[in-house]
Image (cartoon, grey):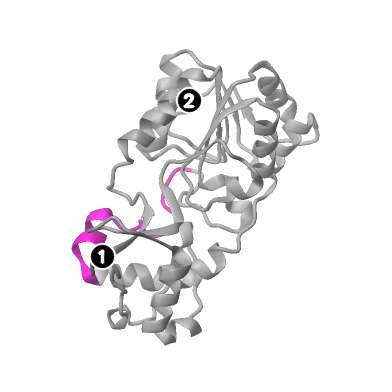
Amino acid sequence: MSARLSEFLARHQRLFVLTGAGISTASGIPDYRDESGKWKHRKPMEYRDFVGSHRARQRYWARSFVGWQRFQHASPNPAHLALARLERQGRLIRTVTQNVDGLHQRAGSRRVTELHGSLTTVECLDCAAQIPRASMQQSLLAGNPLLAHLTAQPAPDGDAVLDDYDETEIHVPSCKACGGRLKPAVVFFGESVPKARVESCYDALRQADAVLIVGSSLMVYSGFRFVREASRAGLPIAAINRGKTRADELIGLKLETDCARTLNAAIRGDDSETGRIEM
C-alpha cells in the first residue's frame, strides 16, 4: 500500500536514496539475486581474474560485446522517473546507485553517485587513459567480425550468457596510448570502491533525515555500509524490495512490491498499489 510510503516521504524532506539492480528490472536489465538473496546467474567475474588472466578478459569482452547491444538501449522506467521528480522537488539529497546503467541520469536525476562506476566508459589499467564504450565496441568488432552475428540471453550489468562460442579466439584490443589492459570503468566483485567516492556518500548521508532503499538486497557490503551507518545515526529507513535484504532488522518500513509501480504511486499520493508491508 503506497499510502504508508507516501506518509514516509511526506515526513522526510531530505532523503538519501540507495538503489540496486531491482530498480532496473522493469527496464529489461536482469538482476543478480532471487528473493532469498541467492544468485540467479553464475557469479560475476572477479577483479583478480580479469586483471590476472588474458583468457578471463577474452571471456569477459566477448560476452560484454553481445550484452551491450541490448543494455545500451534500456530506458528509464517509472521508478527512475519518480526519483528524478523527487529531486526536482528539492526533497532528495543524493541518489547513490549500485547500478552501472546510467538510467537515473537519463531519467533526469543530477545528484547521482554511481557507486560502482559506469559501463559507458572504458579505462586502461596501466596508464589510466579513458575511452568511450562505443570506441571499445568498434575495436572489438574490427578485430572479431563474427561477434556481430552472435545473440545471447542477457545477464546483469550488460553481460550475456554465451556458452557455445570459443572465446579463446577473441582478439582483445589494447590501450592505444600504452598498449595496456582495458577494463570497463566499473567496480568488479572483489575490487574496492574508490575511497573518495565512499566518503562523498557518507557526507550526503550526514545531511539526510531518512534513507530510502529501492531494489537492493544489500548483500554487497558497498551499499549495506550506508544503511548500517544510517541505523547507527538513528535515521528512519524504508525499503522497496522483493524478498530478503541483508538489513531487514534495520528497516522500519519494508514493501515487498514492484519498485516501479510502488514508488511512482507513492509519489503521486496514489493508494491503489497493494503489497505486503512489514514494520
Which image quadrant for residue 201? top left
**Residue at the disc numbered 2:** 204
Left or right: 194 in relation to 6: left
Label 2: how many Cα within 10 Å (few below 14, some 14–19, many 20+) = some
Of 237 and 99, nearer the camera is 99
**In this picture, is 196 found above or below 105?**
above
**In this picture, is 124 found above or below 102?**
below
Tell me the magenta residue range: 36-54
User: How many marks on residues?
Assistant: 2
Label 1: how many Cα within 10 Å (few below 14, some 14–19, many 20+) = some
Of 261 and 19, nearer the camera is 19
Mark 2 vs mark 1: which is more N-terminal? 1
**Per the image, is 39 magenta?**
yes
Residue flagged by tag 1: what amino acid is it? Arg
The residue sitting at 70% across, 36% down in the picture is 85
Determine the CA span between mark 2 and mark 1. Answer: 34 Å
Q: Main secondary structure of the magenta part?
A: loop
**In this picture, is 231 found above or below 93?**
above
**Residue 266: x %, y % from top left:** 73, 31
SS at circle 2: helix
Report whether residue 1 is seen.
no
Q: Quadrant of the C terminus?
A: top right
**Residue at the disc numbered 1:** 181
